Image: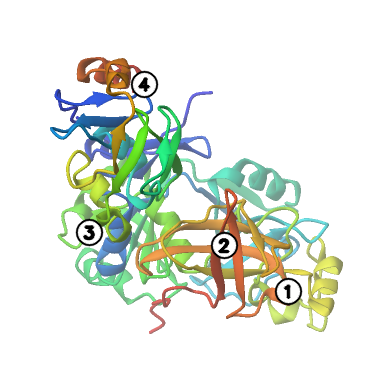
Amino acid sequence: MSLLTTPLDTLHRELGAKMVPFAGYDMPVQYPDGIIKEHLHTRAAAGLFDVSHMGQVVIEGPGAAAMLEGLVPVDIEALENNRQTYALFTNTRGGVLDDLIITRWAQDRFFLVVNAACKAQDIEHLRAHLSGQSLQVLEQQALLALQGPRAREVMSELCPEAAKLVFMQGCHTAIDGVDVYITCSGYTGEDGFEISVPAAEAEALARKLLAWEQVAPVGLGARDSLRLEAGLCLYGNELTEDIDPVQAGLLWSISKSRREDGERAGGFPGADVVFERIRNRPALRRVGLKVEGKRPVRAGQAVTDADGNKVGEVCSAGYGASVGGPVAMAYVQRTVGEPGTALAVDVRGKPVSVTVARMPFTPQRYYRG
Amino acid sequence: MSQTPSELKYASSHEWARLEEDGSVTVGITDHAQEALGDVVFVELPEVGSNIAAGEEAGVVESVKAASDIYAPVGGEVLAVNPQLEDEPETVNSDPYNDGWFFKLQPTDASELDALLNAADYQARCDEDD
């Protein structure tokens, strides 16, 4: 099967990116600077990420909010125009089909950004639940993310209107006469923006952004280590069809009004299972692991207690360049999930000491106004 | 383009070996290998005094992306390991053939070096992989 490319493919190659297959796309895993430098640059200045492989979908029509509420445990009715929410598509077993961002564009019009790997399945899932609304996949839109503490000063020169946005807010605006939708969001733990731009104009915009001395291109490798340090879930690692939102530590993403005692309780797939988990707390929980020393641990490795008994499994791991050492997330038995608990990870037969740590590993620096 | 110094010998598993004037052999990983691995964050080295056979596992190099075994290109007793790699594993990326060396062996049979690849053959092997 041939790989799909994003509208920035030519630019990636020109910049010397190392390309790898990811979710069916040929994507830059790193540029010549390397993952650690790209990671640190994003935390110090601003990184430019191509996230055009993600799915952009518009749902429009009467009852669109109610239709979405039938799929996600979030109060969509209460979402204001140009505000965004994190959401989960749940399955009937209370597991997670995908995580996504929903933005309200108008009373009956919503903009969804979903994971590349789940895109086809998500679109099918949405279509199957339409009740008179239309669904449009924005195939001709690219998505660029500008992330980091200096992203806002770049935005104030590029598009002053967008530089006023606060976390999880968006606006329709224009850059050099090109219509774009800009949101204040991202997946690095930093302040920053995501720009949905027509594919034909994406390369020019990326080149323009890279001309700022604060901005450097950042690949998927650093995107992963940044989100890991920020304690954010990656679908396929922390979230799967067999992991429920409570176990994943995402109870906060379930709106009060949609919980068992809320005014619009349930009504999403697997609600009964999720409510049972909220009442009884699942046996496993997602935790952060601070790794002693420099030897990295890897996803899939077993977590053990002091006696060597298996108590969990690493779901994401990597080098936390800002932390200055290896970090990981794991699912462990609740009884050993308290921060400060000493555990070990079995790295190819060698026990590596780890401590359950509070997440995020690095402070989130979202701009809330 | 990665560097392949002509005075070194190479294993197809991407280690280089240099015969020193005192008869010892210094071992590291190639520029091609460090480039493929990406940022190196941890190196596990053999114990000084231990004996390793040619082709035997001698350590592990871990990058931000993956773990890779290191093999001894020739057999012998480990005379020294590079102490710098403990605190500065990134030296493997910045200077793979000098400051980024891994360990030094007293070869049991120096003729094992003859079985290794020369620079041109190793380079050709890497080009095939790309």
| Residue type, mark 2 in image | Cys
Say which residue label 3 marks.
A215
Circle 3: residue type = Val
Q: Is residue A140 visible?
A: no
Disc number for residue A334:
1
Q: Nearer the viewer, mark 2 or mark 4?
A: 4
Front of the two marks 1 and 2 = 1
Q: Which residue in the structure is indicated by mark 4?
A: B129
- Location of the C terminus of chain A (image quadrant): bottom left
Q: Mark 3 touching mark 1, by CB under 8 A? A: no
Circles 3 and 2 in contact, beta carbons < 8 Å:
no
User: Which residue shows up at 81% across the image and 72% down it?
Assistant: A277
Element type at mark 1? helix
> Where does the image place residue A154, in percent across and percent down from the top left?
22, 66
Between the residue at mark 3 and the residue at mark 2, the CA separation in whole angstroms equals 25 Å
Asked if residue A333 lies left or right of residue A238, the reply is right
In this figure, which residue is indicated by the disc labeled 2?
A233
